Amino acid sequence: MASANHSTLYHRVWRWHFIAGLVIIPFAVILSITGGIYLFKPQVEMATERSVNGRAEGSASARLSMDDVIDIVLTAYPEATFRRLTLPRFEGDLTAEVELRMGQEDRLLWVHLPTGDILHDIPKDQRLMNVVKDIHGNLMAGNNGSYVVELMASWMIVLIITGAYLWWPRKTHWWRMFLPKFAAPSRRDFLKQLHGVSGAWMGGVIFIILLSGLPWTQVWGDGFKAVQKVMGWDGPGQEWVVTLQSSNQPILKDDGLDLWTTGGGEEAVPSLTSTPKADHSQGIPLQAILDQSQASVLPAPVEIQPPRGENGVWTIRSMTQNRPHRVTAHYDQWTGEEIMRIEFADHHPVKRLASYGIAFHEGALFGWVNQLVGVLATLAVVALSVTGGLMWWRRKPAHTLGVPPLPEDKKLSFTVIGLIGLLALFLPLVGLSLLLALLGEFIYHKMRSR
């Protein structure tokens, strides 16, 4: 009886693995390749900086202040709104990046610091890494595309788990899953072994990469944020409270800019305020705040966000992809006083753990070795997709998909029901799609029986 139950479970898992794999193949290839390209974002953006710097004619020892840089771009585009400034990224970088909002479009401008010339000007969404990120995150289809990406990534996690179950050796040594005998009698058997060994060697890494990307998603990511809020994990680990000396405002609390963003929503807006004193006719120059904050020593890229309204604060933050090194600081726009600094250690351990995963996902956690691991994972996903597709193509009968038939015992065992329940709990889109598939299968067979 136990053997029959095992056979039924194996057959059903094989059927799920087959159908899900067939659907996911094109998405897996697209997501893995774009993810592999995005691993090299720092190098690509460094090359862009050097290319833009090369367009400058002549040089000078003196540099403009960042206040002058902002004035130059706003003079060139008087109808625009200043959104963000990025400091030079490396020693010898003579340009600062300024982001402007112009109507419904964001533009990036590179300003040559010695001369004030605008060397380059492009829509932000046309920047190479932004295009790659858009494809990887939502297939360039907005929020609807991000749901598709989350569904495919969630099913890829299921494919890793079910693949391990199917590939696990049952009549030989366990290590044969890593070193199978390649003396196969047919090309299809060779493809099967290549498919299995690719998953055996890199499946764990791919699983971690997929799992670490879930905080960015719509359904899972928003659910994770909701759990953090309920459990009190969403703010820094310390109780950060600030009383501004420039006014009699009540005590205000800020839990800082998030270590990552989810979905397509707007970025977090600090709740800190800075109210002008009576003896201040204008705010402190930005350059003075930068000089005293030593922002240039923070890990690049360092972004500056302007105050939002009369009571807003200057925000200086390192946006390095290695999130454990990120720092966010807020400054009173009227006095230049640092009123809050949030470092990685100030966040809750759960948030820090997720951020380590995201840094690994982006290839930034431990340098070029992390990037190499990411490239190997990319190649493994492509290999799994190609070998899986070829196996299906060689075995399928003409004019049919060749889907494995249902097991003879079509009733769902408690084990299968439990698995579906766990999937629905941990990966909601997988659980929902699986339930819809089972319902459709049930209706189809009922109609056929009639």
Image: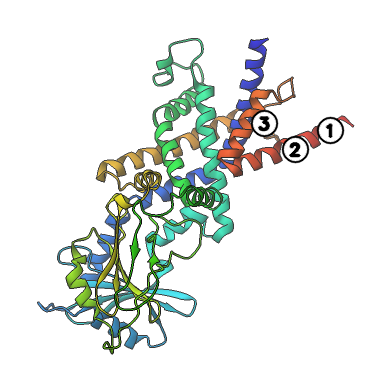
Residue 380 position, x and y percent, is: 41, 36
Apparent side of residue 385 relative to residue 366 in the rendered image (left or right): right
The kind of residue on which mark 1 rests is: Lys
What numbered label is drawn on residue 439? 2
Q: Quadrant of the C terminus?
A: top right
What numbered label is drawn on residue 403? 3
Decide: is 59 above or below 199.
Answer: below
- Residue 333 occupies quadrant: bottom left
Residue 63 position, x and y percent, is: 15, 78
Q: Residue at x 27, y 52 (%)?
A: 325
Decide: is 295 above or below 180.
Answer: below
Dot 1 falls on a residue whose secondary structure is helix
Residue 36 position, x and y percent, is: 38, 47
Q: Nearer the viewer, residue 22 or 247?
A: 247
Question: How has the structure been colored for display?
Answer: rainbow
- Residue under pointer 1: 446
